[in-house]
Amino acid sequence: MLDWLRRRGEATARKASKDGDLFDEEFQRRLEVLAIVSRRLVAGRTRAERRSKKTGAGIEFADHRQYTPGDDFRHLDWNLYARTGRLLLRLYEEEEDLSVYVLLDVSRSMAVGDPPKLDYAKRLAAALGYISLANLDRVSVVTFDSGVSGRLAPTRGKNRIFKVFEFLRPLTADGRTGTADAMKTFVTQNKRRGVAILISDLYDPEGFEGGINTLRFHKFEPYVIQVFDPAEVRPPLHGDVRLVDNETGEVREVTITPRVLERYAEAHAKYRKRIADFCTQKQVPYYPLETSVPFDEAVLDILRRGGLVG
Amino acid sequence: MELVGLSLTEVLTVLGGFAAAVTVLYLLKLRRRQVEVPFVHLWQEVLAEKQTTRLFSALKRLLSWLLALAVVAAVAFAMGDPRYAGASDEGQTTVVLIDASASMRATDVEPSRLEAGRAEVERLIEGLGPDDRMIVAQMDASTVPLTSLTGDPMLLSEGLERLAPTDVAADLSRGLRFALDVLRDRPRPRMVIVSDGVLGEGGDAARRAAEAGVELTWTKIGEGGPNVAITAFSVRRYPLDKSRSQVLVELWNPGEEDQGVELSLLGDGEPIDVQRIVVAGGERLRRFFENVSGADRTLEARLTLADGTRDAQPADDRAYARLPERRRARVQAVTAGNLYLSAALLLDEYLDVVEVSPADYPAEGRFDVTIFDGWVPPSPPDTHAIYLHPVPAEGVQGPFEVTGALERPYFDRIEHDHPLVQFTALRDVNVSAGLEVELQEGDRVIAGDEGAPLIVTGTRNDHRIVALLFDVRRSDLPLRVAWPLLLLNSIDHFVQEDAGYLSSYETGDTWHVPAPAGVESARLITPQGAESTVPIVDGRAVCTGTRAGFYTLRAGDQEDVFAANLGPSDEAIVEPAEQLSIGGVDAAPPTIGRAGVRTEIWTMLVLGVLAALLLEWFTYHRRITV
């Protein structure tokens, strides 16, 4: 199943990048599969308190979902089973549902890569959003560069995923990265605490730490997903070049040699380690993702490592 | 070291100009490729380290600049065409006479003497100094320059390519005269003869060469080996049976040891006879092949050693001959009845004879020859004619004006070489009476008494005539073999099938080949297929050739084939001479220029430049210098 997901994911990414529609039918089918697989992955595992909040506690019917071994079959909809022969579980709205905020970096540095990191991040955001919606979480998508540049109001229910698509589809990468200021704005605008999934390349001249700390200090539960293109680690450059920062416009002249490329790869690894060390220290889950990894495989990997959804 | 191309000043000017341009280009700030990156801060650490390598970069840049200057310097120097100064003494003028006679086709040295000679001349060309001049000439029956007098080795080598073998004897005298003409008033004259040395004395030209102060040198070619040559090859049809021929072959073994050979005869390209013969050392062996049939047009003799291998000289192992064409001649015999005449004409099956009485003359049809037996027509015929005892009737203009009679004339004077009387014995023929006639201008007496002609040829009414100025019936000529032979020779003479037909010509001679009347030029095609136009003078094409084989003469719409052979000469002697003496002066081996004297340094400089550019390309594309 995972191999199939990987193969399909690579093919879909290439096709979507060419066609221009990131959220085509193929993508949506894969989201559905992802939602099912994600439930199987977390089934039988010790779940956080959040699970008990989702089913059984409320009285208001919210949605159906496929029965999975391990589910409490007191919630099976027998009437539906009699009519359709399918085992579906009745889900109820909780008293206090979970808010999931997907914080998507749309600064200009996210335009780099083939496919661009922003496209990858959009699909990632959509996938995580869908899984959360499928679990009756309240999902909001917030975009930021040097400040908050867009916001999808919190929404709930699996069928609201199309609103998420519509929100993500027109986004373009522009502006400078300013995570700290953007997070300050975000926490001011969103009083309801919840999970804050930060999807960014974390290329912030002012430092990535301020933004994450802001989320922590305001009782959000931050998750950090860093996306980067393989070519950023080992750029296909040689000879005398003039490097221009595509956000700040800063210029550096350098003669690229194999040795220089090696040193740069080391610097990049060092930067990622700095982020990882910081997150570990602050007990913030951190997921570095290369855009060459299919997005659904990346999502499943995140789920396996636990904590983010389910 | 000296510069043959641009002068030193020009070289330095070019070098200075280009070096300045290269330096200016290097001083220009490098325009770097612009690349957008997402986070330039990550490069900071790398760039901090790069500061330490800036010195190395500067050094690399300096090395690159120096390399460019070296390339410019090498190219500028190459334009000067530098040569070693040691090679530049006073220039020498050399005439190379390369022997292309038949003996140089010998294969005692691989692949042949001519090729070995060519290689020797190449060595001489390579050894030319910068001021030396040379001309290369092919010496055979004539001497033909292959190049102009030049110091350019490439032109000399190109000219040498035109050297071609021949089947003629070399004429040293002509070669020497040519060389002396070229070397007159030239500095340091030198003559190099590339030959096997079998060239003869050279006559007066050799004496002049020895006295002219010319350095006479000889490059000896050849080692010697066994050889048997065909020195004569001739064929003739039997006069009375032209379907068969008699062939004469003469073989010569110039060596000391006996040689067993296999002699093959080919008629029209097909083998018709093979004989094994032993030719003793120094022997000239004549062998006749009698009653040879199966050949209609061409005959070829081929010689190999008895073991099937070729001897050292292939040029004289083949000989060619052309058989006279057998043509059916139409003869009109105007006679009141002559049994001797009728019988003689019956002997040649290729004659269509029509007999008519003088009263019925002329018979219907076209004829090649008309024989008038004791009768003269009122007007000359429009054919060739044989007059027997031509006494015209009164009032008739005959071919001759008869002025009297001769009693018992004798054949005192006979032109034995004339084809009319070939193979005949006339001296003791008895004639009771002959005619005393007035000859006309152009008439030629073939045989006759001291005071009067008996057999005369000439031209009347644009046709040839033969006249026997006696009555054959009043002589014992009809009782002899000479009578039909004389008649048939005459007819053959008219229809170009004369007994004096040449079965082959000798290479190097001037040939006079019978050609159709009324044509001024003809195309001559050599055995190698080369074509040329030759003039026709007095009914014969005047031409020559240097290769043995079958030639084709195309005149108008007629085409004829004739053969040419290497004539009798010393070309069969394949032992090279021990010493070549010219005018009493022994020719010494030539001094070949110091190896490398002509080596052109500019080629090495250009190669060096290419190597440097290749290194630059490699280091750049392998990211070593960038």
Image: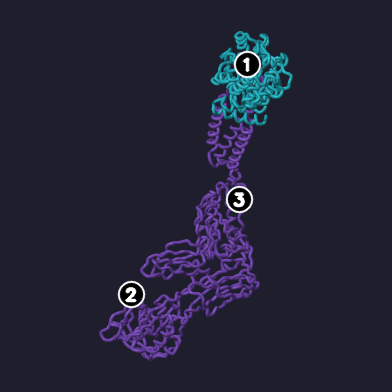
Chain colours: A cyan, B purple
Q: Residues within 10 Å of mark 3 (few under 14, many from 20)?
A: some
For marks 3 and 2, give the CA distance: 68 Å
Give the labeled residue for mark 2: B462
Whether residue B242 sits left or right of residue B76 in the image: it is left
Mark 1: which amino acid? Answer: Phe
Q: Position of residue B311 (x, y in %)?
A: 62, 67
- Name the residue nearer the viewer: B373 or B296: B296
Q: Residues within 10 Å of mark 1 (few under 14, many from 20)?
A: few
Quadrant (top left/top right/bottom left/bottom right) for the C terminus of chain B: top right
Q: Position of residue A213 (x, y in %)?
A: 67, 11
Q: Chain under label 3?
A: B
Give the labeled residue for mark 3: B593
Q: Chain under label 1?
A: A
Mark 3: which amino acid? Answer: Gly
Residue B514 vertical position relative to residue B128 in the rendered view, above or below: below
Query: Mark 1 or mark 2: which is in front?
Result: 1
Q: Quadrant of residue B339?
A: bottom left
Q: Residue at x 62, y 19 (%)?
A: A63
Q: Position of residue B250 (x, y in %)?
A: 56, 74
Instruction: Identify the secondary structure beneath mark 1.
Output: strand
Whether residue A185 sits left or right of residue B506 in the image: it is right
Instruction: Identify the secondary structure beneath mark 3.
Output: loop
Quadrant (top left/top right/bottom left/bottom right) for the N terminus of chain B: top right
Whichever of labels 3 and 2 marks the residue nearer the N terminus, that label is 2
Does residue A291 appear anywhere in the picture?
no
For marks 1 and 2, give the CA distance: 141 Å
Q: Position of residue A91 (x, y in %)?
A: 65, 18
Instruction: Identify the secondary structure beneath mark 2.
Output: loop
Residue A61 circle label: 1
Mark 2: which amino acid? Answer: Asp
Q: Chain under label 2?
A: B
